[in-house]
Image (cartoon, helix red, strand yellow):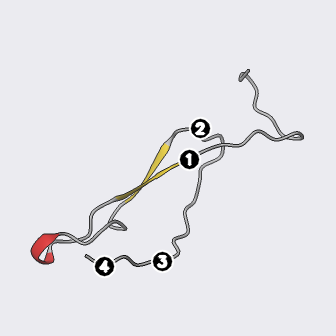
Amino acid sequence: MQNRTRTITVRVPAGVKDGSKIRLAGQGEAGLRGAPSGDLFVTVHVRSDKIFGREGET
């Protein structure tokens, strides 16, 4: 198995919550025996900000 690095642009929807997962279809690792690539899941981590906040969250 070989490791590789690549850059992927991900559009994160407004208002996404911490811990949400975004699925990128076909962007994962290649399948076995020539099968198509799987899906890549990105977990979102939202940082607190001194200026911006979210309504309804504590």
User: Is 54 left, or right, of 7 in this rendering?
Assistant: right
**Secondary structure of the residue carrying numbered label 1:** loop
User: Is 22 left, or right, of 3 in this rendering?
Assistant: right
Contact between marks 2 and 1 (CB within 8 A): the answer is yes
Disc 3 marks a residue whose amino acid type is: Arg
Disc 4 marks a residue whose amino acid type is: Gln
Q: Quadrant of the C terminus?
A: top right
Dot 2 corresponds to which residue? 18
**Residue plotted at (27% across, 63% down):** 38
Which sits earlier in the primary sequence, circle 4 or circle 2? 4
**Residue plotted at (25% across, 72% down):** 30
User: Where is residue 48 shown, x and y percent of the image?
Assistant: 76, 39
Q: Residues within 10 Å of mark 1 (few under 14, many from 20)?
A: some
Dot 3 corresponds to which residue? 6
Which sits earlier in the primary sequence, circle 1 or circle 3? 3
Q: Nearer the viewer, mark 4 or mark 3?
A: 4
User: Where is residue 26 shown, x and y percent of the image?
Assistant: 32, 66
User: Is 49 left, or right, of 29 in this rendering?
Assistant: right
Dot 4 corresponds to which residue? 2
Dot 1 corresponds to which residue? 44
Which sits earlier in the primary sequence, circle 1 or circle 4? 4
Disc 1 marks a residue whose amino acid type is: Val
Contact between marks 1 and 3 (CB within 8 A): the answer is no
Q: Residues within 10 Å of mark 2 (few under 14, many from 20)?
A: few
